[in-house]
C-alpha cells in the first residue's frame, strides 16, 4: 500500500529516531577504531588486509553511511507509524510486487540483527513497546523502532560503503555487534524521554476488524497456548487473550486506563483468583505468628502457589520474576519495622505486585513506579506511629485497609488505579498532619507569615540587585544594600508603613550610603560629606538594630566601609552631570514599590544565591517559643554525634540490583546533605538533639519548603521547628537521619541478597 506523502510521524517518535541515528554514528566511530586495533593484532595477512580495507572504506564513506542509514530509518518509521486500514486487504493490484533475492537477504540479515538486540534488550524492548503503543494509538500494533527496523537501516547504510561483498559482510558483523551494545542505552533513553513527556505506557487492547472479526491488537493470530482447549475456552482467549482482561472485566472498562504491560490470560486468571483469597487480613490462623506480638501475619501466597504460577508462566524470565517477588515478600512480611497490622495489609497486595512485575519491567528499575510508591509509602507512614491504639493511627490503618481493598477488588492491571489510591493516601496524610499541627498550637500559621516576609525580602533583593547592577561603586556596598538593607526596608514597611517618616528616612540612608563612597574631588564635596557622615552612621546602626543584624557582621562591614570613605576623599571627583545621573538612578531604584507578600516573582527572574546575611528569617523570642524553633546556639556542633541505636546498614544501588532484571535507579538518600531535599510529610526520622537521639515525625512543611515542623513524644507531643538552613546543617553533620535504612521494597531486596550470599558462602 502506498503511503500519503503528507504523513509525518509524531514529534516524540522523530526525537526517538534521532537517538537511534546518534547511536549509529557512535557505533561507526567505535567500529573504525576497533577495526584498526583488530588489524594490528591480526597475524593473518589476508585477514589484516580485509580489516584495513573495511576500516578505510567505512572511514571514507562514513557520511554516506549516515545519510543512507537515516533515510532508510526515516522511511521505515514513516511506514510503520502511518495509520493503517482495518480492511485487511490491499488498496490496488499495483501495490503488489515481487520480492527479489537481495531484498529477502536483507530481511533475513535484519531479523538476525533484531534477535541479537532482542536478547540483550529484552526488558527495555518490552517497556518501549508499551510506550509506543500509547504514543501511536490503539490502531498501531508494532514498534517502529524495533530491532529489525534498525537492522534494515544498518544494511542499507553498509551497502553504500563498499561494493565488495567480503567488506560488507565484515562490516555487518562488526558494526552490528557494536550497534547492538549501543541500543540498550538508546532504548532506555527513549523510554525516559517518553516518560518525561508525559506518555503513559499502554497495554494491548481489543479491537474489531471488518474481515477478521475480533482479535487482539499487536498480534496477527493468537498463540496455540492461549487458544487451546474447547470452543468456549478459545472464545475467552480471543476476547481476553494477550490483552489480559481478568475474569469479570470487560474491554470497555480497560480502554479507560493504561495497563502495565503484557501478562498471559491464564496467568492473569490465577492471579485474580489468588488475590481474592484471604491473604491473612482476617487473622484466621492461615498465616504465621509474630513471636513478639503474637499477631497472625499473612502467608506468602506466591511461595504457597509457586508451582501453579510457574506452570502458567511464558518463559524462564517470568520464572525469575515469580521467585524474586516471592522472596521479596518473605523479607517484607518479616521486616521488624513493619508492624503486624500493616504487614497484613501489605500481604494482601502480593498478587497485584506480582502482576505489575510480570508485565512492567520498570517495576524493578523505577523508584517512581506507582505500585512501588504505594507500598513504600504506606510502610514508611506506618513506621512513624508508635502506638497503633491511638485514634490517628487507627484512622490511618482503616483508610489503608480501604485503599488496599479497592486495589484487590478493582482492575489492578491499570496504573491509573494506583495513582488514584496514592492521591487518596496523600490527602489523608495532609489531613492528619493538619490536625496534629492544630493540636500543637498551629505553628504553621506563624511560619506561613514568616515565610511570606522572607520571600518578600528575597524578591525585593532581586529587584535591587537588578537596579544596582552596573553602577560604579564598591561591590561590598552593592551587596550590603541588596542583601541586608532590603531586609531593613521590608521590616520598616511592615512596622510603620511605606508612607511613614521612618521608612522614608531609612530609604534615604541607602542612597546616602552609595553616594558616600563616590570620589570627591572638590573641597565643598568633602566638607559636605564630613558633615553628613554622623547622621549616615546613625541611620545605618538604626537599620541594623531593626533586623537584629549580628555584631560580627557589623564589624566586618564597617571594617570595609571606613577605608572606602578614606579612599573616596583622595580621588578625582565626578562631573556634575555624572553625579546627578547616578543620584537619579539610585532614587529610582529605592523608590520602586516593595513586592506584595505572597505575590510570585517577576517573570524571568531567579532568586540570587545569598550569603548568611539573608539566609534565615528573624523570630522574636515569643514566636520562637511558640513554634519550638531550634536555634543554632542550642547545639554543640563541635561534639561528634553518637551512633544511631539499632541502625541498619545503609542500602546501596548494588544491594538492590538483581541479576537478569533491569538495573534500578539510585536509592534515595537516608542521611547526609542530600536527605534535606527528600524529607517527606508523615515520615519518621532520627534527630540528635540535647545530647541524645529521638524519633521524630515530620508534620508540616511550609509551601516554599523554608520551614519544617517535627513532632516528638507519645503522650505529650513536643513541637520542633527548623529553618531550611538548619535542616541542611543537621543533615550535613549527621544529626538528622531517616528512621528507615531504605524504603521497604529496597530494604527487602537488600536483605534477600544478603541472605542468599550467606547461604552460598559455605557452599
Image (cartoon, rainbow, N blue to C red):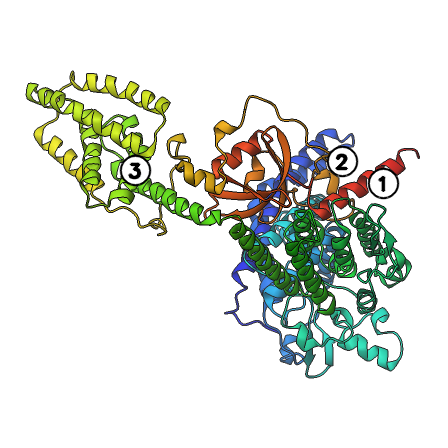
Q: Residue at x 73, y 62 (%)?
A: 104
Mark 3 in CB contact with mark 1 (< 8 angstroms): no
Residue at image mark 3? 486
Residue 719, by quadrant, is: top right
Residue 33 lies, with reference to residue 293, above or below; the image says above
Q: Is residue 2 left or right of residue 481?
A: right
Estimate the spatial distance between the alpha carbons at disc 2 and disc 3, rounded to whole Å. Answer: 79 Å
Please name the residue shown 75% across and 56% down the image.
346
Task: Quickly name the residue at label 1.
Answer: 756
Residue 30 in the image, given as x and y percentages of width and height: 64, 39
Residue 85 in the image, given as x and y percentages of width and height: 62, 77
Instruction: Reply above or below: 351 against 502.
Output: below
Separation of marks 3 and 1 at Cα, in angstroms: 61 Å
- Residue 93 location, x and y as percent? 65, 80
Query: Circle 1: is it few (<14), some (14-19), or many (20+) Cα within 10 Å?
Result: few
- Front: mark 2 or 3: 3
Which percent across, then down, holds residue 607?
Answer: 38, 41
Mark nearer the viewer, 3 or 1: 3
- Comes first in the chain, label 2 or label 3: 2
Distance of label 2 from label 1 (alpha carbons):
51 Å
At label 3, counting other C-alpha atoms closer than 10 Å, the crowd grade (few under 14, some 14-19, many 20 or more) is many
Q: Name the element at disc 2.
A: helix
User: With 126 as the anchor, is 488 left or right in this view?
Assistant: left
Q: Which residue is mark 2?
A: 46
Image quadrant containing the N terminus: bottom right
| Nearest to N terminus: mark 3 or mark 1 | 3
Amino acid at each position: 500500500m502506498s503511503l500519503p506523502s503528507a504523513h509525518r510521524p509524531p514529534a516524540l517518535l522523530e526525537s526517538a529516531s534521532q537517538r537511534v541515528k546518534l547511536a549509529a554514528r557512535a557505533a561507526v566511530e567505535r567500529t573504525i577504531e576497533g577495526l584498526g586495533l583488530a588489524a594490528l593484532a591480526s597475524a593473518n595477512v589476508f585477514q589484516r588486509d580485509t580489516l584495513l580495507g573495511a576500516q578505510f572504506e567505512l572511514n571514507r564513506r562514513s557520511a554516506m553511511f549516515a545519510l543512507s542509514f537515516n533515510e532508510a530509518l526515516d522511511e521505515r518509521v514513516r511506514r510503520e507509524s502511518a495509520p493503517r486500514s482495518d480492511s485487511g486487504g490491499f488498496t490496488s493490484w499495483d501495490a503488489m510486487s515481487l520480492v527479489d533475492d537481495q531484498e529477502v537477504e536483507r530481511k533475513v540479515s535484519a531479523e538476525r540483527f533484531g534477535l541479537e538486540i532482542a536478547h540483550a534488550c529484552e526488558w527495555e524492548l518490552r517497556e518501549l513497546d508499551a510506550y509506543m503503543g500509547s504514543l501511536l494509538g490503539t490502531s498501531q500494533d508494532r514498534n517502529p523502532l524495533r530491532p529489525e527496523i534498525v537492522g534494515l537501516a544498518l544494511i542499507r547504510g553498509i551497502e553504500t560503503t563498499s561494493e565488495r561483498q567480503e567488506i560488507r559482510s565484515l562490516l555487518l558483523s562488526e558494526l552490528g555487534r557494536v550497534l547492538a551494545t549501543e541500543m540498550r542505552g538508546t532504548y532506555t533513553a527513549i523510554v525516559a524521554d517518553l516518560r518525561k513527556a508525559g506518555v503513559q505506557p499502554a497495554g494491548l487492547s481489543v479491537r474489531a476488524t471488518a474481515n477478521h472479526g475480533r482479535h487482539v491488537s499487536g498480534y496477527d493470530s493468537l498463540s496455540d497456548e492461549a487458544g487451546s482447549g474447547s470452543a468456549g475456552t478459545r472464545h475467552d482467549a480471543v476476547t481476553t487473550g494477550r490483552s489480559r482482561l481478568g475474569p469479570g472485566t470487560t474491554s470497555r472498562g480497560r480502554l479507560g486506563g493504561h495497563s502495565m504491560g503484557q501478562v498471559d490470560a491464564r496467568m492473569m486468571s490465577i492471579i485474580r483468583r489468588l488475590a481474592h483469597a484471604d491473604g491473612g487480613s482476617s487473622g484466621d490462623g492461615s498465616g504465621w505468628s509474630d513471636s513478639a506480638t503474637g499477631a497472625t501475619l499473612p502467608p506468602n501466597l506466591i511461595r504457597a502457589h509457586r508451582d501453579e504460577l510457574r506452570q502458567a508462566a511464558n518463559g524462564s524470565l517470568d520464572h525469575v520474576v515469580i521467585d524474586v517477588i516471592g522472596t521479596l515478600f518473605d523479607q517484607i512480611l518479616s521486616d521488624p519495622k513493619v508492624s503486624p497490622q500493616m504487614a497484613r495489609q501489605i500481604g494482601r497486595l502480593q498478587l497485584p505486585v506480582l502482576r505489575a512485575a510480570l508485565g512492567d519491567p520498570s517495576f524493578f528499575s523505577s523508584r517512581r513506579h506507582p505500585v512501588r510508591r504505594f507500598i513504600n509509602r504506606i510502610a514508611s507512614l506506618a513506621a512513624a506511629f508508635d502506638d497503633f491504639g491511638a485514634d490517628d493511627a487507627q484512622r490511618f490503618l482503616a483508610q489503608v485497609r480501604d485503599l488496599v481493598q479497592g486495589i484487590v477488588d478493582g482492575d489492578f492491571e491499570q496504573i491509573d488505579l494506583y495513582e488514584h489510591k496514592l492521591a487518596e493516601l496523600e490527602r489523608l496524610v495532609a489531613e492528619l498532619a493538619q490536625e496534629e499541627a492544630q493540636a500543637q498550637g498551629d505553628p504553621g500559621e506563624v511560619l506561613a507569615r514568616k515565610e511570606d516576609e522572607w520571600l518578600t525580602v528575597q524578591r525585593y533583593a532581586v529587584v535591587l540587585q537588578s537596579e544596582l547592577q552596573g553602577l560604579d561603586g564598591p561591590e561590598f556596598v552593592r551587596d550590603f544594600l541588596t542583601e541586608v538593607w532590603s531586609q531593613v526596608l521590608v521590616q520598616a514597611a511592615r512596622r510603620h508603613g511605606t508612607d511613614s517618616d521612618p521608612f522614608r528616612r531609612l530609604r534615604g540612608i541607602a542612597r546616602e550610603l552609595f553616594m558616600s563612597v563616590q570620589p570627591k574631588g572638590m573641597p565643598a564635596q568633602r566638607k559636605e560629606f564630613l558633615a553628613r557622615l554622623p547622621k549616615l552612621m546613625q541611620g545605618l546602626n538604626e537599620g541594623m538594630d531593626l533586623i537584629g543584624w549580628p555584631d560580627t557582621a557589623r564589624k566586618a562591614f564597617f571594617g570595609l566601609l571606613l577605608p572606602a570613605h578614606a579612599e573616596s576623599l583622595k580621588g578625582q571627583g565626578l562631573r556634575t552631570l555624572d553625579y546627578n545621573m547616578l543620584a537619579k538612578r539610585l532614587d529610582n531604584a529605592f523608590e520602586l514599590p516593595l513586592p506584595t507578600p505572597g505575590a510570585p516573582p517577576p517573570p524571568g527572574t531567579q532568586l540570587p544565591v545569598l550569603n548568611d546575611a539573608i539566609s534565615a528569617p528573624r523570630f522574636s523570642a515569643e514566636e520562637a517559643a511558640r513554634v519550638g524553633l531550634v536555634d543554632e546556639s542550642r547545639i554543640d556542633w563541635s561534639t561528634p554525634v553518637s551512633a544511631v541505636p539499632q541502625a541498619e546498614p545503609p542500602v546501596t544501588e548494588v544491594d538492590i540490583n538483581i541479576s537478569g532484571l533491569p538495573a534500578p535507579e539510585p536509592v534515595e538518600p537516608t542521611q547526609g546533605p542530600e536527605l534535606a531535599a527528600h524529607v517527606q510529610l508523615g515520615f519518621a526520622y532520627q534527630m540528635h538533639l540535647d545530647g541524645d537521639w529521638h524519633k521524630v515525625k515530620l508534620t508540616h512543611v511550609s509551601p516554599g519548603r523554608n520551614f519544617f515542623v517535627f513532632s516528638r513524644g507519645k503522650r505529650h507531643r513536643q513541637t520542633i521547628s527548623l529553618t531550611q538552613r538548619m535542616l541542611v546543617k543537621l543533615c550535613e553533620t549527621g544529626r538528622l537521619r531517616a528512621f528507615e535504612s531504605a524504603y521497604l521494597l529496597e530494604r527487602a531486596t537488600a536483605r534477600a541478597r544478603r541472605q542468599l550470599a550467606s547461604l552460598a558462602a559455605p557452599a
